[in-house]
Image (cartoon, rainbow, N blue to C red):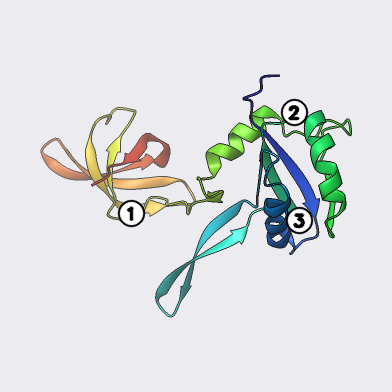
Amino acid sequence: MLKNELYWYILFVRTGDEECIVKRLVRDLEDKDCLPFVPKKTRILRRQGKKTLIYKTCFPGYVFIESHQSSLDFIKNISPIIRNIKNAYRFLSYGDKDDIAMHEEERVFFSNLINDEHCIDVSHGYKEGDSIRVTSGPLVGRESFIVKTNKRRNEATIETSLFGTKTQVTLEMSVIERICT
C-alpha cells in the first residue's frame, strides 16, 4: 500500500451522539493523521414563504474518519482512544475484523457526493423557465427553455422553432443540460 493512499473508516456510535464524538476525536486524534467527520445533507426548509437551509446527518449512528494509515496501523493507533469514548462502539468491517477500511470504490463514490465541508448539497432538478441545451438526439445543439416538466415520466417540454413555427417538443430529461446564465 502507498503511504499517500487515503482511507475512510466508519465508527458505529450511539445515534444522536455523532457530533459530540467527532469533537472528542478531533481533540484526541490531533497528532494521529486523522480527520473525523459526520456526512451531512443540505435541505431547504420552507416556512411561511421563507426558505432556510438546514443540515441533517446522512447516516445517523456513524462517524467517518479519514486517514492515510492502513487498517492495521489505524487499529493499533486508534483503538486505545476509541475504547475510552463512551457511546463509540466499534468499527464497521468488511468480513475480517481487521479489514475495516472502506472499499476504494465506495470511498470514491461518497467523496464525489460530498463537498469540502463533508456535506451533500441540495439537488436542483429542472423547472419551468430553465434555459437548456439538447445534448443528444435529432435536436442536438438546440438551445431553448423549459415550458413544463413531468417529473413522474422524467420529461421536459421545450419550445423550439421547427419548419418556421414555434413548436413544443417533449424530451427525456437525460438528453438536456442546463445552460448557466
Q: Which residue is mark 2?
A: 70
| Residue 64 against residue 98 in the figure, above or below | below
Q: 32 or 172, which lies in front?
A: 32
For disc 2, the neighbor class at 10 Å (few under 14, some 14 to 19, many from 20) is some
Q: Amino acid at mark 2?
A: Ser
Q: Which residue is mark 3?
A: 61
Q: Which residue is mark 1?
A: 148
Q: Quadrant of residue 22?
A: bottom right
For disc 3, the neighbor class at 10 Å (few under 14, some 14 to 19, many from 20) is some
Left/right of residue 147 with respect to residue 73 in the rendered view:
left
Label placed on residue 128: none
Compute the Cα span from label 3 to label 1.
41 Å
Can the viewer see residue 166 in this picture?
A: yes
Dot 3 lies on which element? loop
Dot 2 lies on which element? loop
Q: 58 or 82, which lies in front?
A: 82
Q: Quadrant of residue 111?
A: top right
Dot 1 lies on which element? strand
Can the viewer see residue 59 in this picture?
A: no
